[in-house]
Image (spheres, coloured by chain):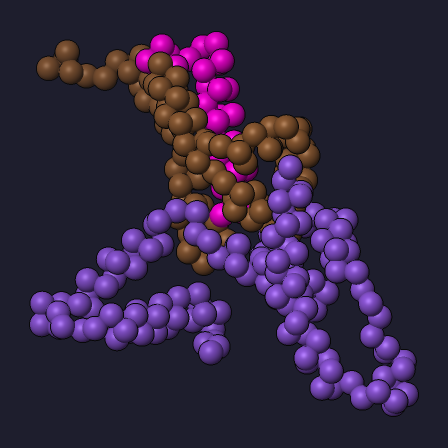
Chain colours: A purple, B brown
Amino acid sequence: MIFSSLLQVYKKYHIRLGAASDEVTGNIVEENTITARLFKKRNIDHDDELQIYLSLPTLDGKTEPLQWWKMNEMQFPGLASMARDYLAIPATSVPSEQCFSTSKNLISSNRNRLIGKTVRACMCLKSWWTGPLENNGQIEF
Amino acid sequence: MENYVFTENDWNIFVQICVFLKPFKEVTTIMSGSTYPTLSTTVPLYNSLVDHIEDTINMGDIEQIISDAAEECKTKLLGYYNKTNNACLIATVLDPRLKLRYYRDNDWGDDLISNIQQV
């Protein structure tokens, strides 16, 4: 069933994330301050994350999925990291093939000894520079 | 030259071809995007194309030549169906616009879903 396989993958993410987040909170929260007691770390059952996500209303078509996950990362850390991986998968090879076409301009007959690493760096820079980041009016790195 | 002029019937066929192909163009454009997630909409869009083809075949007043083509198209498209894997389904659920609603709305039984996963 789709739900069980989803849960299986989610658990893997959660284990990976759990180790990292314990380190972070351990450094910040001191044991005996008033705020520490006030915001005492409650043991949240992380299986809830998925249940809560699924119980929330489905959003309308205009929502940008990636922005939504960015905004709700705090509430769904495990799912958000999963979403970053899964939603990044391109459904078709069109974007990558466009990239190959662009690389033709970079690796010209006069520059045919560029090593792969340089090509990759140049292609990434070009993509970030001319891509959606610029269209938003600002470039974030 | 009169033999080469498009007849009324020819134009009628052109219009029907156009109507038939339009959803394919739309889906192709969406799936080719590179600035937004595309995998999450793969399964829903794929199914909407299959529905569209079936609607065309079942439409009464369609030209024979088009319903034949639609039939071929269906065979071709369904040939790819079993190549979808878990990643497509998980991506759909992780899309806050779709989640499990898509599969529930379309009455995907658990059996069907697990069948697809096993292939």
**Could you tell me which residue is drawn at 19 percent across and 16 percent down?**
B5
**Could you tell me which residue is drawn at 46 percent across and 53 percent down?**
A89
Residue A37: x and y in percent read: 89, 82
Residues B45 and A37: in front is: A37
Q: Is residue B50 above or below residue A113?
A: above
Q: Is residue B9 above or below residue A84?
A: above
Residues A5 and A57: in front is: A5
Question: Is B96 colored magenta in this rendering?
Answer: no
Q: Main secondary structure of the magenta part?
A: helix
Question: In the figure, is residue A7 to the left or right of A36?
Answer: left
Q: Is residue B3 above or below residue B17?
A: above
Question: In the figure, is residue A47 to the left or right of A107?
Answer: right
Residue A53: x and y in percent read: 72, 53
**Could you tell me which residue is drawn at 39 percent across and 37 percent down?**
B25
Residue A16: x and y in percent read: 61, 66
Quarter of the image with the N terminus of chain B is top left
Q: Quadrant of residue B86?
A: top right
Is residue A78 shown to the viewer in this render? Answer: no
Residues B78 and A13: in front is: A13
**Could you tell me which residue is drawn at 43 percent across and 71 percent down?**
A134
Residue B87: x and y in percent read: 52, 46
Question: Is B45 colored magenta in this rendering?
Answer: yes
User: What residue span does the magenta drawing correspond to?
Assistant: B39-67
| Total residue callouts | 0
Question: In the figure, is residue B118 to the left or right of B68?
Answer: right
Is residue A33 shown to the viewer in this render? Answer: yes
Residues B102 and B15: in front is: B102
